[in-house]
Amino acid sequence: MASKKRLIIEMAMGIDQHGQDPTVAAARAVRNAIAHNALPGVWEVAGLSHPNEMIVDIQVAVPFPEQVREAEVLAVLPFGQKTLTLEAGGMVVAGRAIAELNDKNDDMYIAVAAVTVSIPSES
């Protein structure tokens, strides 16, 4: 049976200041988590031949997780065998609605994400 070994866990937050869209906040959190990473260990240490062999588990805590369009969040990651777990969390913070930005109200949504990259390992 195949198992996995974790290589890296990156954490970040993302905010939708205008628009009140939890998908935007979640996608920004994931994008921020991976924005400044290079993973040469995937090839040089783990010996994978292609980045799609990586196992990428994404956890996001965001207001109104049931409204998140999961495919859009997963699309932030260019490679890997991806899974997304959403849970209620993050924050709703009072901002300022701006009509020209199509705000529905003053709410800003903040999401937090953890992106774990693992490699396959025979147990």
Image (cartoon, rainbow, N blue to C red):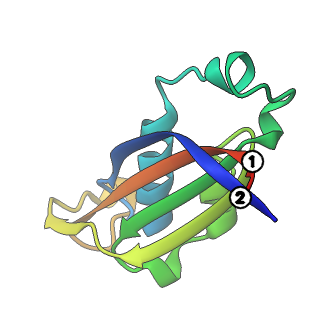
Which secondary structure, mark 1?
Answer: strand
Residue drawn at 29 percent across, 54 percent down: 17
Cα–Cα span, label 2 and label 1 = 6 Å
Disc 2 + disc 1, Cβ < 8 Å: yes
Local packing at callout 2 (Cα closer than 10 Å; few below 14, some 14-19, many 20+) is few
Name the residue that disc number 1 marks. Answer: 120
At which x and y percent is residue 16?
A: 35, 55
Residue drawn at 82 percent across, 65 percent down: 1
Residue drawn at 50 percent across, 41 percent down: 31
Q: Amino acid at mark 2?
A: Ser
Which secondary structure, mark 2?
Answer: strand
Taking the image as shown, residue 49 lies to the left or right of residue 26, namely: right
At which x and y percent is residue 75?
A: 69, 50
Q: For residue 48, which numbered disc appears in the image?
A: none
**Residue 45 is drawn in which quadrant?**
top right
- The first of marks 2 and 1 along the sequence is 2
Residue 21 makes an appearance in the image: no
The one nearer the camera, 14 or 85, is 85
Q: Amino acid at mark 1?
A: Pro
Local packing at callout 1 (Cα closer than 10 Å; few below 14, some 14-19, many 20+) is some
Q: Residue furthest bottom?
A: 66
Q: For residue 3, which numbered disc appears in the image?
A: 2
**Residue 83 is drawn in which quadrant?**
bottom right
Query: How many marks do you count on the picture?
Result: 2
At which x and y percent is residue 103?
A: 33, 65
Residue drawn at 50 percent across, 84 percent down: 66
